[in-house]
Image (spheres, grey):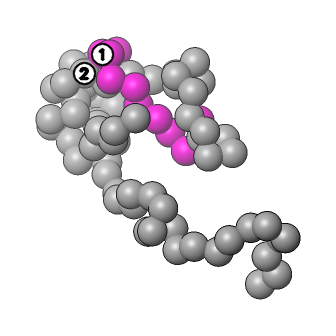
Amino acid sequence: MKVPKGWEVKKLKDIAKITSGGTPKKNMPEYWNGDIPWVRTTEVQNCTIKLKDVKLFITNTGLNKSSAKIFPI
């Protein structure tokens, strides 16, 4: 792999927290329209997530009843 001048190659695990989770069930209205941003891969552009780009929000119930996770800012 050719690396652009000035760039450094690192393993993703060394610069980011990697984990999997799960989407709260879509058929459970009590899981949705809360105040916790639900970030989808389509909302991550150039490694930046902006709150204005987030279209869905989950509730505490949705968070607690699924394998979704909260990450620090």
Residue at the image position 15 percent from the left and 37 percent from the top:
65
Apparent side of residue 20 relative to residue 45 in the rendered image (left or right) = left
Tag 2 secondary structure: loop
Tag 1 secondary structure: strand
Q: Please state the horizontal and vertical placement of residue 14, each as a whole percent of the image.
A: 45, 68
Cα–Cα gap, marks 1 and 2: 4 Å
Apparent side of residue 2 relative to residue 14 in the rendered image (left or right) = right
Apparent side of residue 58 relative to residue 9 in the rendered image (left or right) = left
Q: Which residues are magenta?
A: 33-43
Task: State the image quarter where residue 25 is shown.
Answer: top left
* In the image, farthest residue toward the front: 6
Residue at the image position 33 percent from the left and 23 percent from the top:
36
In contact (CB < 8 Å): disc 1 and disc 2: yes
Is residue 42 visible in the rendered image? The answer is no
Apparent side of residue 38 relative to residue 29 in the rendered image (left or right) = right
- Dot 1 amino acid type: Gly
Task: State the image quarter where residue 6 is shown.
Answer: bottom right
| Residue under label 2 | 59
Label annotation for residue 24: none
Is residue 41 visible in the rendered image? The answer is yes
- Dot 2 amino acid type: Thr
Q: Please state the horizontal and vertical placement of residue 68, each as a whole percent of the image.
A: 28, 43
Quadrant for the C terminus, please: top left
Residue at the image position 46 percent from the left and 35 percent from the top:
39
